[in-house]
Amino acid sequence: MDKLQNEIRTALEQAGREHCGFPEVSWFLKTMAQAFSTETLINEKPSLIVLGEDIPRELALALADHPRFILGGSLETTHWSDALLPRDADPVSRSACGWLLNDKFGLAENAIVVMALSSDNRRKLASLLRGNGIRVAAADMPPRYDTSEAREAWTAEMLRLADTVSAHTRIRLSARRLKAAIRQREQVREAAIDFENIAWQATDSMSPALRDIIMESAWYAPDRKEWACHLRALTAQISTWIRQYYHQPDERPWVLLAGSPIVFPNEKLPNLLEASGLYLADRADPITLQTDIPCADTGHSVPGMLRRTADLRVRMETSGSWISNDGLLSAVQCRLEHLPVSGIVWHVLKGQIEYDFELPRVEALAAEYGVPVIRLETDYQQQDVEQLRIRLEAFAEMLRIRNQERIRIAQ
């Protein structure tokens, strides 16, 4: 438990040092510290735990007053699952298993765990959790998303899931509760978009790792409306700072980090990019892209709102269960069109082979924009840091030479 707390504290302290003194930052760091504190993990006892990013956040918020979101990301919790999962299991599954099955705290003691069966890893994880006495409600994701039948199947799975969770939490999924949850998520989304837009104008205002931690804290804050208010205040502080001070143009190459998700507290790659002389302009992974997905229009019935959610969500979702993952590809293309990205770092966590299937399509797309791609395979361990640093420094030098040549030709 002490090692876990040290991992959390180290990540927050490192990120907290790398900004220009904005007062609001401390609120977000305190929120994350409180969410992962020993006292919270032992005493929280949530009724609903959402595993992964495939379940719509608004549905979880409507089914429980204070759902707990578990995304993985901790090296220490992967150690707790050493005896339960094979060593070649992907780090996200191992970390999630460690959060739920350990003798340190009974996080799932009173909870029902909701997850999407979006890969073989998730199916095996669901079976393992059930075998250890944890209540699991799993949604079977359709293999395609581009047909009306697939969207109806997705909607039916969400309705079935809601019935199972409601029986456990004793909270009925009504249109009123779903509308309120949709409004919460839309407030989060609007505040996040404004924050990202202003952050791109001041690349030296804070580190990308801190920026991503602030964004991820939305799902650990007790009140999402309060979170949105604090993020708007931080956005205003950055905007004022931009107007008051002169900013030297950032000459670092901008890169897009895409592929497997980056999850707090493991900020290994963002920190490595920064140390290698690269600026992490944005991310395109299943967790970050949740902000891109618009909320459904409020309707008069739960099935109607979920059908509208399916129409909006499935074409932008990045579920590993889908044969053609166009959501991830379109997100990469959108960022190439709107940001001065010089290169793409394609991140593959060991064991998440589904992202390797997407790499050739991303490389073909990047070639159309004249943007090189580097593939990095890693896990949560630190042993390969120096090897990755050497590769990233070489990539950064190549991008700088390319950028200088473009400037020379333009002149």
Image (cartoon, grey):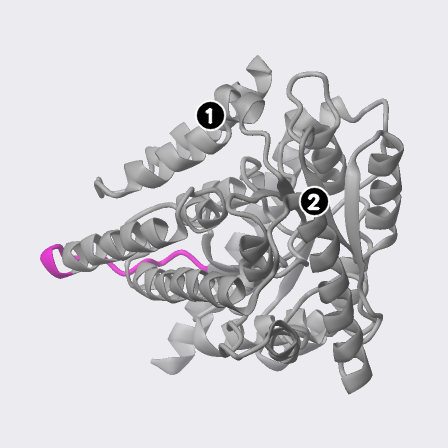
In the picture provided, is 283 more to the left or to the right than 167?
left
**Residue at (79% x, 52% y) in the render:** 138
Quarter of the figure with residue 339: bottom left
Identify the image quadrant of the N terminus: top right
- Residue 233: x and y in percent read 23, 53
In the picture provided, is 64 more to the left or to the right than 150?
left
Q: Is residue 78 above or below residue 317?
A: above
Q: Is residue 311 above or below residue 398?
A: below
Residue that mark 1 sits on:
10
Quarter of the figure with residue 306: bottom right
- Residue 146: x and y in percent read 76, 83
Q: Which amino acid is tagged 2? A: His
Judged from this view, the residue extending furthest toward the top is 2
Most frequent secondary structure within the magenta stretch: loop
Q: Residues within 10 Å of mark 2 (few under 14, many from 20)?
A: some
Q: Which amino acid is tagged 1? A: Thr
Q: Secondary structure at mark 2?
A: helix
Q: Nearer the viewer, mark 2 or mark 1?
A: 2
In this view, the residue in front, 233 or 311, is 311
Residue that mark 2 sits on:
168
User: Which span of residues is magenta-colored?
Assistant: 243-253
Q: Is residue 49 above or below residue 368?
A: above
**Residue at (54% x, 69% y) in the render:** 175
